[in-house]
Image: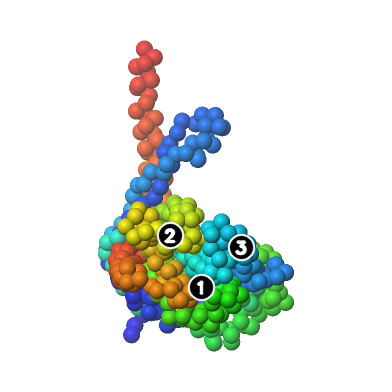
Amino acid sequence: MSVHIRARNLTLEVPYYVQPERQGGSWLGTLVGAATSVPKREFATLLDDVSFDIEEGDRVALIGSNGAGKTTLLRVLTGAFHPTQGHVDIQGSRQALLNLGLGFNPEGTLHENIYLRATAMGIPARTVRTMVQAILEFAELEHVANRRLLTLSSGQRMRLGFAISTSVQHDIMLLDEWFGAGDFSFVRKARARLTSRVEGSKIVVVASHNTDLAKKLCNKGMVLQGGKLAYMGSVTDALAKYKELVEEQKRAKAEAEAAAASASQPADTVSQS
Amino acid sequence: MKSSFLSHLRESTRFPEFWAYSSWLDIVTKYRRTRLGLIWVVVPVAVFVAAIGSIYSRIMGHEPEFYIPYLAIGYVVWRFIVQCTNEAAGILRGHKSFIMDGRTRLTDFVLRSLAKAFFYFVCTVVVIVAALAWSPLTHWWDIFSMLLTFPLVIVNMMWWSACMSLIGARHPDAGELINTALRFGMLLTPILWVGSRFEAGTLGWFAIQANPAYHLITFVRAPILGEQVTNLTYIYLAVMTVGGWILAYLLYRRYARFVPLWI
């Protein structure tokens, strides 16, 4: 069966909590307020009527400003979020590389944590056994395999997480920003593996601000703005469109400011006279 | 894509690697730094049963030979119930990173919380066996009746943990609330005292009969001590088991998909 992702009219509304606004008083008031105020529940539309088709062979770069809905869309694609309306049809095995450093047991040894994460990915214990050595080697952590995880630096943890998550080739790969932690030589090695995984995958969706890599590795671009799909097409066109949108926004903001300034001017003169 | 409690549960039992391994790892690493290691699982229970047992048997006016095995069984089963509840209430929040990565088969996490509590339970059964062997009124091999009775406790804890995990994911208060309730629950349930002290029809009797923990504990405890399980307990447990599973099924179908948003 062909690997694909089809999304139709995806809408996602989520509840979120806001702390009621307070008049900033003394430091004591702020502390008491933080402890006693009850958060209010409100709803936000994170994805608004998004439809698209991703076919086998597509490498899609998700482009958009912060808060445009990139990570949310990835989470819908991993299956964590169910859309409030619309539906998404995904064919093929998925692997998400969203948070590499999380999901470990800090008290366990590296060895044990490899088992933990790999079985969490649904890999049978038998297979994990054959993978352990390769993972440790790739992460360059063989010499500390029996140390507790909490003795590792965050960069080393990241390396381990990356090595585990990329140890198996899946049909669909979902990435949130290209991997960039670790020292220089490891980043190079990781990039090489990532590139090979990207090439080996049938579909890749990556949320990124790194336009160079997006241009190099992706063939399609999807521009999100305020939860809406603003553009989908070739990656160069998408990047151009995104630039255009940002310019437009800047212009609109400048205009709005100018308008506000000119609106307040006559009022001032009136009050003066 | 509806998530069904039963189909998820079936999948989880078919692929136990993750939840079995991670609960085991949790327990092992918790005691890794200590010198006595896993013996710490048993020590608090043993001390409680021995100390409270010998003092309270006098206060309550029971023979220690009867009272200590009675207390041991009740307390160990009660601990299992409490541990299941406590674990379940926080389990989904605790596995946020896994869930956000798309591992939305929540029964994995529910089973993980159960597996952990069950492991502790199995360890502490030693205390019951010791109490039974020590008392001239009982034989240590009476413990084997548990093989028949305890599965029902587990079956009930399954639906209960599933509901608790969902409620705990939505309302973090639930964990605190249940914690408080369980602290009183230990005193309100016939564990330290004997339930038959109230006559049928009195207020105390009704309070006991309404208590689900009482029926679960009695169901396990009575056969070991050579007592009769009343029909009322059978009926209560049957209704609770069926009703609870239906409740878990409905809650899971309705709310499981919201969990990633809540946490």
Disc 1 secondary structure class: helix
Image quadrant in which you'd find residue A206? bottom left
Disc 3 secondary structure class: helix
Q: Nearer the viewer, residue A115 or A165?
A: A115
Percent position of residue A160, x then y? 61, 72
Percent position of residue A189, x then y? 62, 75
What label sits on residue B197 in the rendered view?
2
The quarter of the rendered structure image containing the C terminus of chain B is: bottom left
The residue depicted at 46 percent of the width and 80 percent of the height is B145
Q: Are marks 3 and 1 in contact (CB under 8 Å)?
A: no
The residue depicted at 38 percent of the width and 73 percent of the height is B229
Q: Tell me, yes or no, whether dots 2 and 1 are on the same chain.
A: yes
Q: Chain of mark 2?
A: B
The residue depicted at 66 percent of the width and 65 percent of the height is A150
Dot 3 amino acid type: Ser
Can you identify the residue that label 3 sits on?
B54
Image quadrant in which you'd find residue A53? bottom left
Dot 2 amino acid type: Arg
Q: How many C-alpha atoms fall within 10 Å of the one at disc 1: few (<14), some, or many (≥20)? A: some
Can you identify the residue that label 1 sits on?
B118
The quarter of the rendered structure image containing the N terminus of chain B is: bottom left
Q: Is residue A260 visible?
A: yes
The residue depicted at 40 percent of the width and 47 percent of the height is A17
Task: Please tell me which of labels 2 and 1 falls first in the chain.
Answer: 1
Percent position of residue B220, x then y? 44, 73
